[in-house]
Amino acid sequence: MSDPAGEMALDARPAIAHGMRLQWEPAQDAHVLLYPEGMVKLNGPAGQIMSRCDGVRTIADIVADLERTYKQSGLTADVVAFVALAMQRRWLEAPP
């Protein structure tokens, strides 16, 4: 998933980690990540990124979709940083 410099590869295909479930929670008005020990409430951008991490789309695909959807550019660094954080916290994993 990462190159030797420690940066996330744009061709990585992150997926929600085994044992976790992402869903929209109307009561929280947010995406939440559910796991056996609890729940993580995600802010808007985090929920939008996580909802696209399906193990099929690459990080480059996710960035392109977000930039198209929100009519913004230059989101690569933010998406890569969040995906790296989510991988560290074991919310996301790389499919085999």
Image: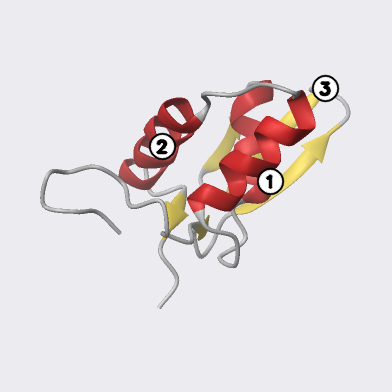
Q: Quadrant of residue 24?
A: top right
Q: For label 1, count other residues whose C-alpha is less than 10 Å away and answer few (under 14), some (14-19) or many (20+).
A: some
Q: Which numbered disc, 2 or 3, marks the residue that appears first in the sequence?
A: 3
Circles 1 and 3: CB distance less than 8 Å?
no
Q: Kindly tell me whether residue 42 is visible in this rendering.
A: no
Q: Residue at x 42, y 40 (%)?
A: 86
What residue does disc 3 label? Answer: 29
**What amino acid does circle 1 point to?**
Ser
Disc number placed over residue 64 in the picture, else none? none
Image quadrant occupied by the N terminus: bottom left
Residue pictured at 36% horizontal, 35% vertical:
85
From the top left corner, tell me how far across and down residue 55 is, in percent: 56, 65
Residue 96 locus on image (x, y percent):
40, 78
Instruction: Please name the amino acid that badge 3 sits on.
Output: Asp
The residue that appears at 60% across and 46% down in the rendered structure is: 62
Please name the amino acid that badge 2 sits on.
Answer: Val
Question: According to the image, label 1 marks what residue?
Answer: 51
Kind of element beneath mark 1: helix
Residue 52 visible, this orientation: yes
Asked if residue 75 lies left or right of residue 48, the reply is: left
Of residues 30 and 8, the one nearer the viewer is 8
Marks 2/1: CA–CA distance: 15 Å
Q: Seen in the image, is 94 located left or right of residue 31?
A: left
First reached walking from the N terminus: tag 2 or tag 1:
1
Is 44 on the left or on the right of 26, as rendered?
A: left
Between tags 2 and 3, which lies in front?
Answer: 2
Is residue 6 shown above or below 4? above
Q: Mark 1 or mark 3, which is nearer to you?
A: 1
Element carrying mark 3: loop
Residue at the spot of label 2: 80
What percent of the width, then of the height, locates residue 39?
Answer: 59, 37
